[in-house]
Image (cartoon, rainbow, N blue to C red):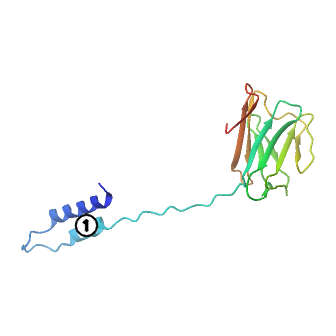
Amino acid sequence: MRPRSYLALVTVLALALVAPPIGADAAPLVFPLLLKSWVASPVPTPTPTVTPTRDAGGVRIVDLAYDERDETVTLRNDGLKDQSLTGWSLLSGVGNQRFHFPDGYTLSVGGTVRIHSGPDAYGNPPGDLLWTKSYVWNNAGDVAVLYDDVGREVHRLGYFAAANSAMPGS
């Protein structure tokens, strides 16, 4: 049964039960009229409000090479506009180490950047950024998590030692 049909049925039943008989000198029909206006009036359906979300520019972690002396995490901007990475960070989930992107750093549309760690790591901005000369990524398995400038997770990529390769969404 449809909601409106149900409301109409309830109204009719309520009026039939409390309305005075025809021709009787009964009290005014205040209660049934109130009931009718309360029950028969359609309840407005709330309109969903679209809350705009922050555009992360389509920046994604596309590769994580962890078993080299030069470990790299590669990000790519698949968005429709250049994305400022000022205030953004990259986290190694297992070791809880965090890389902070330099102020003013912008990843252009279609552009990539590699973040290097390990003994043979190097930096050659803007395409290659140096994190540390220490190892960051756990060879048994780890997860790289990218955060925007307000601390919201933008993307993650994890891997397992048995596969020796990155697995999206883990």
Q: Which residue is mark 1?
A: 35
Percent position (x, y) of residue 15? 18, 65
Using the image, determine if residue 70 lies above or below residue 104: above
Residue 122 or 77: which is nearer the viewer? 77
Using the image, determine if residue 75 lies above or below residue 71: below
Left or right, 28 with respect to 102, comes to left
In the picture, residue 133 is in which quadrant?
top right
Q: Tag 1: residue type? A: Leu
Residue 107 or 147: which is nearer the viewer? 107
Quarter of the image for the N terminus: give it: bottom left
Left or right, 7 with respect to 151, comes to left
Q: Residue furthest top?
A: 162
Residue lying at 88% horizontally and 46% vertically, measured from the top left: 129
In the picture, residue 72 is in which quadrant?
top right
Q: Secondary structure at mark 1?
A: helix
Residue lying at 77% horizontally and 35% vertically, measured from the top left: 95
Using the image, determine if residue 128 lies above or below residue 39: above
Quarter of the image for the C terminus: give it: top right
Percent position (x, y) of residue 96? 76, 38
Is the residue marked by circle 1 packed among few (<14), some (14-19), or many (20+) residues within 10 Å? some
